[in-house]
Image (cartoon, rainbow, N blue to C red):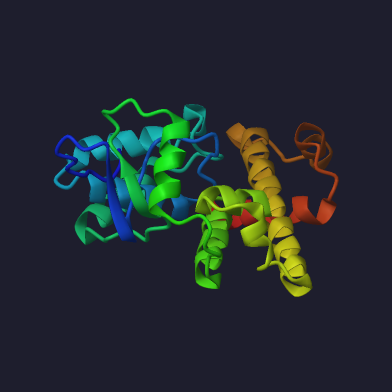
Amino acid sequence: MESPFKFKGKDYLYFPDGCNFYSLYRTTRKINSFSELEYVAEKFIYLNPGFNQHIMKRLFVQLSDRQSGHIIRTYGEMRVEAMVEKVCLAKKTPYCSKLRKIIFNPSKMIDKKTKMQIVGRLVNTKEKPPKTQIDGCIEELWLDQEKITIGKIADRLNKSRYLIKWYFDNDTVEYIKKINQEIKDTLLMSKAIEAIDILTDNGNRLKMRRLKEITSIRDYALLKKAVSRYQSQI
């Protein structure tokens, strides 16, 4: 379910330049597109090379049903199975959004405070992070569809808010505001598409008034865009 490492009894491993790290553990965030489902499949087969393709197809057909609680809308069985076949054949190394400097041994019981002390000792928290590092963290938050704030960046980089603030000049603040609005709209659109899928089950006609009621979204342009995107994915 995540990148394997040989700890040889050690509590943690330290990689000064960072290393690729993939994880498939579930979060509260749902998969919101078919391309994201394919990315999950790429990570799955990368972490489990040689996995039985027939079983993988069955697992991803189940995963792609919104009743599983993992995804915002249901995708057809044939489409999902074809995607799994393609991914298994390509054996692509997935894009890695998480470079880790410290990997803690999951078999060791280490409390959060101790982990933070280890991180603080190995990764000098008094050094101002370079622009490239903050850019990477912002991109990671963007990919995870999380609101970008100074606090979240500081937590992810294990730095103080003071050492992050230098990055946020007036132009950057305005740029981040636009990104956060885009993230908010994307999440609302995902919510709308999920609702559309429910309302149009069994060929039922979509009613915008009902869509507004169950999503609490009042932006008609956003709802119209969600309908258009939903129809393009059918």
- State whether residue 88 is above or below residue 7: below
Please give left or right for residue 1 compared with residue 34 in the image: left
Q: In the image, what residue occupies the spot 83% across and 51% down?
A: 220
Q: In the image, what residue occupies the spot 75% across and 66% down?
A: 173
Please give left or right for residue 207 compared with residue 148 in the image: right
Residue 122, percent from left and from top: 38, 52
Q: Nearer the viewer, residue 35 or 1?
A: 1
Could one spot residue 18 in this view of the protein? no
Q: Nearer the viewer, residue 109 or 63?
A: 109
- State whether residue 110 is above or below residue 151: above
Residue 85, percent from left and from top: 25, 51
Please give left or right for residue 105 compared with residue 165 in the image: left
Residue 116, percent from left and from top: 46, 40
- State whether residue 133 is above or below residue 160: below
Q: Quadrant of residue 208?
A: top right
Q: Nearer the viewer, residue 28 or 73?
A: 28
Farthest residue in the bottom direction?
A: 171
Q: Nearer the viewer, residue 163 or 227?
A: 163
Quadrant (top left/top right/bottom left/bottom right) for the N terminus: top left
Residue 149, percent from left and from top: 68, 53
Could one spot residue 178 in this view of the protein? yes
What number of labels is visible?
0
Q: In the image, what residue occupies the spot 76% across and 74% down?
A: 171
